[in-house]
Amino acid sequence: MPAVIVVGAQWGDEGKGKATDQLGSAVDYVVKFNGGNNAGHTVVVDGEKYALHLLPSGILSPGVTPVIGPGVVVDLEVLFQELDDLRSRGMDVSRLKISASAHIIPSYNRTIDKVSERFLGKRQIGTTGRGIGPTYADKMNRVGIRIQDLFDASILRQKVEAALVNKNSLLVKVYNRRAADVDQVTEELLSYAERVRPMVIDTALELNTALDEGKTVLFEAGQATMLDVDHGTYPFVTSSSATAGGACTGSGVGPTRIDRVVGVIKAYTTRVGEGPFPTELTDEVGEALRQAGGEFGVTTGRPRRTGWYDAVIARYAARVNGLTDFVMTKLDVLSTYDEIPVCVAYEIDGVRVEEMPASQSDFHHAKPIYEMLPGWKEDITHCRTFDELPANAQAYVEHLEKISGCRISCIGVGPSRDATIVRHELVPQR
Protein backbone atom coordinates (compact mmCIF):
# COMPACT_ATOMS: atom_id res chain seq x y z
CA MET A 1 0.00 0.00 0.00
CA PRO A 2 1.26 3.53 -0.77
CA ALA A 3 2.60 6.53 1.05
CA VAL A 4 0.89 9.61 -0.41
CA ILE A 5 1.75 13.28 0.13
CA VAL A 6 -0.94 15.95 -0.27
CA VAL A 7 0.31 19.53 -0.64
CA GLY A 8 -1.18 22.87 -1.57
CA ALA A 9 -0.12 23.95 -5.05
CA GLN A 10 -0.90 27.67 -4.74
CA TRP A 11 -0.86 30.01 -1.69
CA GLY A 12 -2.97 27.83 0.60
CA ASP A 13 -6.72 27.47 1.19
CA GLU A 14 -7.02 25.20 -1.87
CA GLY A 15 -9.14 22.61 -0.07
CA LYS A 16 -6.43 20.21 1.14
CA GLY A 17 -8.55 19.26 4.13
CA LYS A 18 -11.38 18.04 1.93
CA ALA A 19 -8.99 16.21 -0.38
CA THR A 20 -7.35 14.50 2.58
CA ASP A 21 -10.68 13.71 4.18
CA GLN A 22 -11.97 12.11 0.98
CA LEU A 23 -9.00 9.77 0.98
CA GLY A 24 -9.53 8.98 4.66
CA SER A 25 -11.54 5.80 4.17
CA ALA A 26 -8.72 4.37 2.05
CA VAL A 27 -5.82 5.13 4.40
CA ASP A 28 -4.65 4.01 7.82
CA TYR A 29 -2.72 7.11 8.95
CA VAL A 30 -3.02 10.82 8.19
CA VAL A 31 0.08 12.80 9.18
CA LYS A 32 0.40 16.55 9.63
CA PHE A 33 4.10 17.27 9.03
CA ASN A 34 4.53 21.06 9.12
CA GLY A 35 3.04 24.30 10.39
CA GLY A 36 0.76 24.72 13.35
CA ASN A 37 -2.57 26.38 13.99
CA ASN A 38 -1.79 29.12 11.48
CA ALA A 39 -3.76 27.35 8.76
CA GLY A 40 -7.28 25.99 8.67
CA HIS A 41 -9.07 23.15 6.93
CA THR A 42 -12.85 23.19 6.47
CA VAL A 43 -14.39 19.76 6.02
CA VAL A 44 -18.11 19.08 5.56
CA VAL A 45 -19.28 15.66 6.80
CA ASP A 46 -22.97 14.69 6.54
CA GLY A 47 -23.91 18.35 6.27
CA GLU A 48 -21.86 19.27 9.36
CA LYS A 49 -19.00 21.76 8.91
CA TYR A 50 -15.78 21.17 10.84
CA ALA A 51 -13.02 23.80 10.98
CA LEU A 52 -9.68 22.23 11.88
CA HIS A 53 -6.56 24.26 12.58
CA LEU A 54 -3.96 22.11 14.30
CA LEU A 55 -5.45 18.63 14.02
CA PRO A 56 -4.94 16.46 10.92
CA SER A 57 -8.06 16.06 8.78
CA GLY A 58 -7.90 12.30 9.27
CA ILE A 59 -9.27 12.74 12.78
CA LEU A 60 -12.74 12.93 11.19
CA SER A 61 -12.43 9.51 9.52
CA PRO A 62 -13.31 6.41 11.59
CA GLY A 63 -10.48 3.91 11.79
CA VAL A 64 -7.80 6.38 10.71
CA THR A 65 -4.93 7.22 13.07
CA PRO A 66 -4.18 10.97 12.94
CA VAL A 67 -0.57 11.93 13.64
CA ILE A 68 1.11 15.24 14.49
CA GLY A 69 4.70 14.84 13.32
CA PRO A 70 7.97 16.30 14.62
CA GLY A 71 7.91 19.07 11.99
CA VAL A 72 4.78 20.63 13.51
CA VAL A 73 4.71 23.36 16.17
CA VAL A 74 1.98 22.75 18.75
CA ASP A 75 -0.09 25.26 20.69
CA LEU A 76 -1.28 23.05 23.54
CA GLU A 77 -4.21 25.29 24.42
CA VAL A 78 -5.48 25.17 20.84
CA LEU A 79 -4.88 21.42 20.68
CA PHE A 80 -7.16 20.68 23.60
CA GLN A 81 -9.76 23.23 22.53
CA GLU A 82 -10.07 21.47 19.19
CA LEU A 83 -10.16 18.02 20.78
CA ASP A 84 -12.84 19.12 23.25
CA ASP A 85 -14.92 20.66 20.48
CA LEU A 86 -14.82 17.48 18.42
CA ARG A 87 -15.68 15.35 21.45
CA SER A 88 -18.67 17.57 22.18
CA ARG A 89 -19.90 16.86 18.65
CA GLY A 90 -19.63 13.11 19.08
CA MET A 91 -16.28 12.54 17.35
CA ASP A 92 -13.83 9.91 18.59
CA VAL A 93 -10.46 11.62 19.05
CA SER A 94 -8.76 8.89 21.07
CA ARG A 95 -6.55 7.74 18.18
CA LEU A 96 -4.48 10.94 17.97
CA LYS A 97 -0.70 10.46 18.19
CA ILE A 98 1.82 13.28 18.73
CA SER A 99 5.57 13.20 18.16
CA ALA A 100 7.67 13.60 21.29
CA SER A 101 9.97 15.78 19.18
CA ALA A 102 7.34 18.29 18.02
CA HIS A 103 8.00 21.80 19.31
CA ILE A 104 5.60 23.68 21.59
CA ILE A 105 4.41 27.24 20.99
CA PRO A 106 4.86 28.98 24.37
CA SER A 107 2.78 32.03 25.28
CA TYR A 108 5.71 34.42 24.96
CA ASN A 109 6.13 33.54 21.28
CA ARG A 110 2.52 34.46 20.57
CA THR A 111 3.17 37.84 22.18
CA ILE A 112 6.39 38.38 20.22
CA ASP A 113 4.69 37.40 16.95
CA LYS A 114 1.95 39.99 17.38
CA VAL A 115 4.07 42.90 18.58
CA SER A 116 6.87 42.33 16.07
CA GLU A 117 4.39 42.31 13.18
CA ARG A 118 2.91 45.61 14.33
CA PHE A 119 6.43 46.97 14.76
CA LEU A 120 7.12 46.34 11.06
CA GLY A 121 4.43 48.81 10.00
CA LYS A 122 4.18 48.98 6.20
CA ARG A 123 6.67 46.11 5.91
CA GLN A 124 4.32 43.63 7.60
CA ILE A 125 4.41 40.07 6.30
CA GLY A 126 0.81 39.28 7.20
CA THR A 127 1.36 36.56 9.81
CA THR A 128 -1.54 35.10 11.78
CA GLY A 129 0.05 36.17 15.09
CA ARG A 130 -0.13 32.60 16.45
CA GLY A 131 3.55 32.41 17.42
CA ILE A 132 4.48 30.08 14.57
CA GLY A 133 7.45 32.02 13.19
CA PRO A 134 9.11 32.75 16.56
CA THR A 135 8.74 29.08 17.54
CA TYR A 136 10.41 27.86 14.36
CA ALA A 137 13.12 30.48 14.94
CA ASP A 138 13.65 29.05 18.44
CA LYS A 139 13.89 25.59 16.92
CA MET A 140 16.67 26.68 14.57
CA ASN A 141 18.38 28.67 17.33
CA ARG A 142 18.25 25.55 19.53
CA VAL A 143 16.32 27.23 22.33
CA GLY A 144 13.01 25.56 21.52
CA ILE A 145 10.81 23.55 23.88
CA ARG A 146 9.59 20.13 22.75
CA ILE A 147 6.66 17.98 23.80
CA GLN A 148 9.01 15.54 25.56
CA ASP A 149 10.29 18.37 27.78
CA LEU A 150 6.90 18.50 29.52
CA PHE A 151 7.73 15.25 31.30
CA ASP A 152 10.79 16.56 33.15
CA ALA A 153 9.89 19.66 35.18
CA SER A 154 13.50 20.51 35.96
CA ILE A 155 14.63 20.34 32.32
CA LEU A 156 11.54 22.28 31.22
CA ARG A 157 12.24 25.15 33.61
CA GLN A 158 15.87 25.32 32.50
CA LYS A 159 14.82 25.52 28.86
CA VAL A 160 12.21 28.21 29.51
CA GLU A 161 14.76 30.20 31.50
CA ALA A 162 17.35 29.94 28.71
CA ALA A 163 14.83 31.00 26.07
CA LEU A 164 13.68 34.01 28.06
CA VAL A 165 17.14 35.52 28.49
CA ASN A 166 16.94 37.07 25.03
CA LYS A 167 13.15 37.04 24.70
CA ASN A 168 12.62 39.26 27.73
CA SER A 169 15.27 41.71 26.59
CA LEU A 170 13.43 41.97 23.30
CA LEU A 171 10.02 42.38 24.94
CA VAL A 172 11.14 44.99 27.46
CA LYS A 173 13.82 47.00 25.68
CA VAL A 174 12.52 46.95 22.10
CA TYR A 175 8.77 46.45 22.31
CA ASN A 176 8.17 48.11 25.71
CA ARG A 177 6.27 45.06 26.98
CA ARG A 178 6.28 43.26 30.30
CA ALA A 179 8.83 40.48 30.73
CA ALA A 180 7.54 36.90 30.75
CA ASP A 181 7.87 35.12 34.10
CA VAL A 182 9.85 31.87 34.03
CA ASP A 183 7.84 30.17 36.77
CA GLN A 184 4.50 31.22 35.32
CA VAL A 185 5.36 29.97 31.83
CA THR A 186 6.75 26.70 33.22
CA GLU A 187 3.65 26.04 35.33
CA GLU A 188 1.36 26.79 32.41
CA LEU A 189 3.18 24.29 30.21
CA LEU A 190 3.32 21.65 32.95
CA SER A 191 -0.45 21.89 33.37
CA TYR A 192 -0.82 20.09 30.02
CA ALA A 193 1.71 17.32 30.69
CA GLU A 194 -0.49 14.53 32.03
CA ARG A 195 -3.26 15.16 29.55
CA VAL A 196 -0.97 15.01 26.53
CA ARG A 197 1.21 12.13 27.80
CA PRO A 198 -0.99 9.24 26.51
CA MET A 199 -0.84 10.68 22.98
CA VAL A 200 2.94 11.03 22.79
CA ILE A 201 4.99 8.39 20.95
CA ASP A 202 7.90 7.99 18.54
CA THR A 203 5.74 8.78 15.51
CA ALA A 204 8.55 8.17 12.99
CA LEU A 205 8.93 4.61 14.25
CA GLU A 206 5.15 4.09 14.18
CA LEU A 207 4.82 5.33 10.60
CA ASN A 208 7.74 3.36 9.21
CA THR A 209 6.46 0.21 10.93
CA ALA A 210 3.01 0.84 9.44
CA LEU A 211 4.49 1.07 5.94
CA ASP A 212 6.48 -2.12 6.58
CA GLU A 213 3.17 -3.81 7.43
CA GLY A 214 1.57 -2.71 4.15
CA LYS A 215 -0.58 0.04 5.61
CA THR A 216 -1.34 3.30 3.78
CA VAL A 217 0.01 6.59 5.12
CA LEU A 218 -1.14 9.99 3.89
CA PHE A 219 0.96 13.09 4.61
CA GLU A 220 -1.03 16.31 4.84
CA ALA A 221 0.75 19.65 4.34
CA GLY A 222 -0.20 22.86 6.07
CA GLN A 223 0.03 26.07 4.04
CA ALA A 224 1.17 25.59 0.42
CA THR A 225 3.95 25.59 -2.17
CA MET A 226 4.02 29.36 -2.71
CA LEU A 227 4.27 29.86 1.06
CA ASP A 228 7.13 27.40 1.54
CA VAL A 229 10.05 29.03 3.37
CA ASP A 230 12.52 27.92 0.66
CA HIS A 231 10.41 27.78 -2.50
CA GLY A 232 7.69 30.35 -1.90
CA THR A 233 7.42 34.11 -2.38
CA TYR A 234 9.95 34.92 0.34
CA PRO A 235 9.72 36.79 2.71
CA PHE A 236 5.92 36.60 2.36
CA VAL A 237 5.92 32.94 3.34
CA THR A 238 5.32 30.68 6.29
CA SER A 239 8.16 29.46 8.53
CA SER A 240 8.14 25.79 7.57
CA SER A 241 8.63 23.46 4.60
CA ALA A 242 5.19 23.17 3.00
CA THR A 243 6.36 21.32 -0.12
CA ALA A 244 6.62 17.57 -0.59
CA GLY A 245 10.19 17.42 0.72
CA GLY A 246 8.93 18.73 4.04
CA ALA A 247 6.83 15.58 4.44
CA CYS A 248 9.99 13.54 4.84
CA THR A 249 11.83 15.86 7.23
CA GLY A 250 8.63 16.63 9.14
CA SER A 251 7.65 13.01 9.67
CA GLY A 252 10.82 10.89 9.73
CA VAL A 253 9.73 8.84 6.70
CA GLY A 254 12.38 8.74 3.96
CA PRO A 255 11.78 9.84 0.34
CA THR A 256 12.25 6.36 -1.11
CA ARG A 257 9.04 5.32 0.66
CA ILE A 258 6.82 7.89 -1.06
CA ASP A 259 4.62 6.54 -3.87
CA ARG A 260 2.48 9.51 -4.92
CA VAL A 261 2.50 13.28 -4.52
CA VAL A 262 -0.81 15.08 -4.93
CA GLY A 263 -1.11 18.84 -5.41
CA VAL A 264 -4.39 20.50 -4.51
CA ILE A 265 -5.24 23.50 -6.66
CA LYS A 266 -8.32 25.70 -7.01
CA ALA A 267 -9.98 26.33 -10.36
CA TYR A 268 -8.95 29.93 -9.70
CA THR A 269 -6.36 31.42 -7.28
CA THR A 270 -6.45 32.96 -3.80
CA ARG A 271 -3.97 34.05 -1.18
CA VAL A 272 -4.06 35.53 2.33
CA GLY A 273 -1.50 38.00 3.61
CA GLU A 274 0.95 40.25 1.87
CA GLY A 275 3.16 39.59 -1.15
CA PRO A 276 3.03 39.48 -4.96
CA PHE A 277 0.03 37.92 -6.71
CA PRO A 278 0.13 38.36 -10.53
CA THR A 279 -3.49 37.43 -11.34
CA GLU A 280 -5.06 39.29 -8.40
CA LEU A 281 -8.42 40.95 -9.04
CA THR A 282 -8.85 44.10 -6.96
CA ASP A 283 -12.16 45.19 -8.52
CA GLU A 284 -15.78 44.11 -8.27
CA VAL A 285 -14.97 40.95 -10.26
CA GLY A 286 -12.55 39.88 -7.54
CA GLU A 287 -15.10 40.67 -4.83
CA ALA A 288 -17.78 38.65 -6.64
CA LEU A 289 -15.37 35.72 -6.89
CA ARG A 290 -14.59 36.07 -3.16
CA GLN A 291 -18.27 35.97 -2.24
CA ALA A 292 -19.11 33.12 -4.61
CA GLY A 293 -16.25 31.00 -3.30
CA GLY A 294 -16.70 31.93 0.37
CA GLU A 295 -13.09 33.08 0.39
CA PHE A 296 -12.54 34.02 4.00
CA GLY A 297 -9.81 32.50 6.15
CA VAL A 298 -10.79 29.53 8.33
CA THR A 299 -8.27 30.52 11.00
CA THR A 300 -8.31 34.33 10.81
CA GLY A 301 -11.58 35.18 9.07
CA ARG A 302 -9.60 37.54 6.82
CA PRO A 303 -10.96 38.04 3.29
CA ARG A 304 -8.76 36.20 0.83
CA ARG A 305 -7.30 37.95 -2.18
CA THR A 306 -8.74 36.44 -5.35
CA GLY A 307 -7.56 36.02 -8.94
CA TRP A 308 -7.79 33.86 -12.03
CA TYR A 309 -6.06 30.51 -12.47
CA ASP A 310 -2.29 30.81 -12.88
CA ALA A 311 -0.75 28.00 -14.92
CA VAL A 312 2.78 29.34 -14.34
CA ILE A 313 2.39 28.70 -10.62
CA ALA A 314 0.81 25.31 -11.31
CA ARG A 315 3.77 24.23 -13.43
CA TYR A 316 6.16 25.47 -10.78
CA ALA A 317 4.33 23.53 -8.06
CA ALA A 318 4.31 20.40 -10.20
CA ARG A 319 8.07 20.69 -10.65
CA VAL A 320 9.29 21.49 -7.12
CA ASN A 321 6.97 18.92 -5.53
CA GLY A 322 7.39 16.20 -8.13
CA LEU A 323 3.61 15.99 -8.43
CA THR A 324 1.98 12.87 -9.82
CA ASP A 325 -1.58 14.26 -9.66
CA PHE A 326 -3.60 17.43 -9.20
CA VAL A 327 -6.85 17.61 -7.27
CA MET A 328 -8.81 20.61 -8.51
CA THR A 329 -11.34 22.17 -6.14
CA LYS A 330 -14.19 24.68 -6.50
CA LEU A 331 -14.84 24.26 -10.20
CA ASP A 332 -18.49 24.98 -9.41
CA VAL A 333 -17.61 28.54 -8.32
CA LEU A 334 -16.85 29.41 -11.96
CA SER A 335 -20.29 28.41 -13.24
CA THR A 336 -21.53 31.98 -13.74
CA TYR A 337 -19.07 33.27 -16.35
CA ASP A 338 -19.45 33.65 -20.13
CA GLU A 339 -15.67 33.57 -20.47
CA ILE A 340 -12.96 32.62 -17.99
CA PRO A 341 -9.43 34.08 -18.20
CA VAL A 342 -6.53 31.73 -17.54
CA CYS A 343 -2.98 33.01 -17.02
CA VAL A 344 -0.61 31.04 -19.27
CA ALA A 345 2.53 33.21 -18.98
CA TYR A 346 3.84 36.51 -17.62
CA GLU A 347 5.14 39.65 -19.23
CA ILE A 348 8.20 41.00 -17.43
CA ASP A 349 9.86 44.12 -18.81
CA GLY A 350 8.27 43.45 -22.18
CA VAL A 351 9.43 39.82 -22.34
CA ARG A 352 7.11 36.79 -22.30
CA VAL A 353 8.07 34.42 -19.47
CA GLU A 354 6.46 30.98 -19.16
CA GLU A 355 8.20 29.72 -16.02
CA MET A 356 8.37 31.06 -12.48
CA PRO A 357 10.91 33.92 -12.35
CA ALA A 358 14.00 33.19 -10.27
CA SER A 359 14.00 36.76 -8.98
CA GLN A 360 11.42 37.92 -6.46
CA SER A 361 11.69 41.41 -7.95
CA ASP A 362 10.80 40.07 -11.40
CA PHE A 363 7.87 38.13 -9.96
CA HIS A 364 6.63 41.25 -8.22
CA HIS A 365 6.53 43.06 -11.58
CA ALA A 366 5.07 40.15 -13.56
CA LYS A 367 1.95 40.93 -15.58
CA PRO A 368 -0.34 38.03 -16.47
CA ILE A 369 -0.85 36.98 -20.07
CA TYR A 370 -4.32 35.51 -20.40
CA GLU A 371 -6.10 33.06 -22.64
CA MET A 372 -9.90 33.29 -22.66
CA LEU A 373 -11.80 30.03 -22.29
CA PRO A 374 -15.57 29.69 -22.81
CA GLY A 375 -17.68 29.35 -19.64
CA TRP A 376 -20.62 27.02 -19.10
CA LYS A 377 -23.15 28.89 -16.90
CA GLU A 378 -24.75 25.68 -15.64
CA ASP A 379 -25.06 24.22 -12.15
CA ILE A 380 -22.52 21.39 -11.89
CA THR A 381 -22.84 20.57 -8.17
CA HIS A 382 -24.85 17.42 -8.98
CA CYS A 383 -22.23 16.01 -11.38
CA ARG A 384 -20.38 12.92 -10.20
CA THR A 385 -18.68 11.80 -13.42
CA PHE A 386 -16.58 13.78 -15.86
CA ASP A 387 -19.00 13.06 -18.70
CA GLU A 388 -21.82 14.70 -16.73
CA LEU A 389 -20.03 18.05 -16.79
CA PRO A 390 -21.03 20.55 -19.49
CA ALA A 391 -18.77 20.37 -22.54
CA ASN A 392 -17.14 23.73 -21.79
CA ALA A 393 -16.41 22.69 -18.20
CA GLN A 394 -14.76 19.53 -19.49
CA ALA A 395 -12.74 21.61 -21.95
CA TYR A 396 -11.67 23.98 -19.16
CA VAL A 397 -10.34 21.11 -17.05
CA GLU A 398 -8.63 19.43 -20.00
CA HIS A 399 -6.94 22.66 -21.09
CA LEU A 400 -5.71 23.40 -17.54
CA GLU A 401 -4.40 19.85 -17.32
CA LYS A 402 -2.50 20.34 -20.59
CA ILE A 403 -0.80 23.59 -19.49
CA SER A 404 -0.23 22.76 -15.79
CA GLY A 405 2.32 19.98 -16.06
CA CYS A 406 0.37 17.20 -14.38
CA ARG A 407 -2.85 15.24 -14.76
CA ILE A 408 -5.99 16.41 -12.93
CA SER A 409 -7.24 13.29 -11.20
CA CYS A 410 -10.09 14.64 -9.06
CA ILE A 411 -12.42 17.63 -9.44
CA GLY A 412 -14.40 19.26 -6.63
CA VAL A 413 -17.84 20.50 -7.65
CA GLY A 414 -19.24 21.45 -4.23
CA PRO A 415 -18.39 21.67 -0.53
CA SER A 416 -19.74 18.32 0.64
CA ARG A 417 -17.61 15.22 1.04
CA ASP A 418 -19.18 13.43 -1.93
CA ALA A 419 -19.20 16.40 -4.35
CA THR A 420 -16.17 15.13 -6.22
CA ILE A 421 -15.52 13.72 -9.67
CA VAL A 422 -12.81 11.05 -9.69
CA ARG A 423 -10.98 10.62 -12.98
CA HIS A 424 -8.06 8.59 -11.59
CA GLU A 425 -7.91 6.85 -8.20
CA LEU A 426 -5.29 8.39 -5.92
CA VAL A 427 -5.21 5.53 -3.44
CA PRO A 428 -6.37 1.92 -3.98
CA GLN A 429 -9.84 1.64 -2.45
CA ARG A 430 -10.63 -1.07 0.05
Image: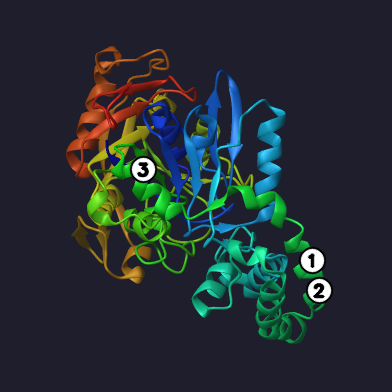
Residue 145 place in picture, x, y as percent: 61, 69
The residue indicated by pointer 3 is 210
Q: Amino acid at mark 3?
A: Ala
In the image, 219 versus 174, the foreground residue is 219
Measure the C-alpha gap from mark 3 to mark 1. 36 Å
Rendered position, 320 above or below 270 = below
Q: Residue at x 77, y 83 (%)?
A: 172
In the image, 260 versus 123, the foreground residue is 260
Rendered position, 364 above or below 181 = above
The numbered mark at residue 141 is none
Q: Residue at x 69, y 85 (%)?
A: 165
The residue indicated by pointer 2 is 183
Is 178 on the left-hand or right-hand side of 158?
right
* Foreground: disc 3 or disc 1: 3
The residue indicated by pointer 1 is 187
Q: Is residue 236 visible?
A: yes
Image quadrant where one finds the C terminus = top left
Whether tag 2 and tag 1 are in contact, CB under 8 A, the answer is: yes
Q: Amino acid at mark 1?
A: Glu
Image quadrant where one finds the N terminus = top left
Rendered position, 242 above or below 9 = below
Name the secondary structure under disc 2: helix
Name the secondary structure under disc 3: helix
Chain-order first, disc 3 or disc 2 = 2
Q: Is residue 124 visible?
A: no
Q: Amino acid at mark 2?
A: Asp
Measure the C-alpha gap from mark 3 to mark 2. 40 Å
Chain-order first, disc 3 or disc 1 = 1
Name the secondary structure under disc 1: helix
Residue 69 place in picture, x, y as percent: 48, 54
Residue 241 falls in image quadrant: bottom left
Is 309 on the left-hand or right-hand side of 302?
left
